[in-house]
Amino acid sequence: MKTIKGDLIKLTKNGDFNVIIHGCNCFCNMGAGIAKQIKKNFPEAYEADLKTKKGDRNKLGTWSNSKIRDLLIFNAYTQFGYGRNQRHTDYNAIQSAFKSIAVEVKKICNEPRIGYPAIGAGYGGGDWRIISKIIDKEFDGLDHTFVYLI
């Protein structure tokens, strides 16, 4: 895993990444954190989220996605609920989502350059040390970068 400081949205718009992944809850709102920024800058990602069933716990560990020209955006369902001061992040859901995203990316993208924020570690309340190890394991062999805000 590479790690860089920066703004994931700006870097993506500048062409640094052709695949981005962010964590979502299962309620189709994308109302806070990086999800809110993705919703604003890439509304197609939100439209993909809205095509899933709102409040469905079975979405945990799955994803929806959208393609905008040469950019793939994955909405990874890594937490059921949302709110502050508690852990909503489901580590098993992160593992399942990233495992299947890796398979999908390898199928549809010749040279993926993947970027993502600290999925599950912000509003999700998860431990980035645990999450980053999961991502590193599932994305072994892929060009992937953790982008943290400056």
Image: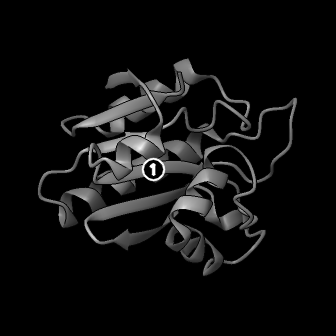
> Is 139 left, or right, of 122 in this rendering?
left
Near-viewer residue (15 or 96)? 15
Q: How many marks?
A: 1
Q: Residue at x 34, y 39 (%)?
A: 138
> Is 62 left, or right, of 66 in this rendering?
right
Is 7 rendered above or below residue 12? Answer: above
Examine the rendering and report whether any part of residue 77 can be seen: no
x, y (%) of residue 87? 78, 33
Near-viewer residue (103 or 68)? 68
Near-viewer residue (124 or 148)? 148
Is 150 rendered above or below residue 11? Answer: above
Is 101 rendered above or below residue 67? Answer: above
Q: Residue at x 67, y 29 (%)?
A: 126
Does dot 1 land on a helix, a strand or a loop?
Answer: strand
Examine the rendering and report whether any part of residue 57 can be seen: yes
Quarter where residue 86 is shown = top right
x, y (%) of residue 40? 61, 61
Quarter where residue 47 is shown = bottom right
Near-viewer residue (17 or 23)? 17
Which residue is labeled 1 in the image? 21
Q: Residues within 10 Å of mark 1 (few under 14, many from 20)?
A: many
Q: How is the image coloured?
A: one colour
x, y (%) of residue 38? 56, 56
Q: Quadrant of the N terminus?
A: top left
Mark 1: amino acid = Ile
x, y (%) of residue 49? 60, 71
- The residue lying furthest to the left in this view is 110
Is 18 rendered above or below residue 54? Answer: above
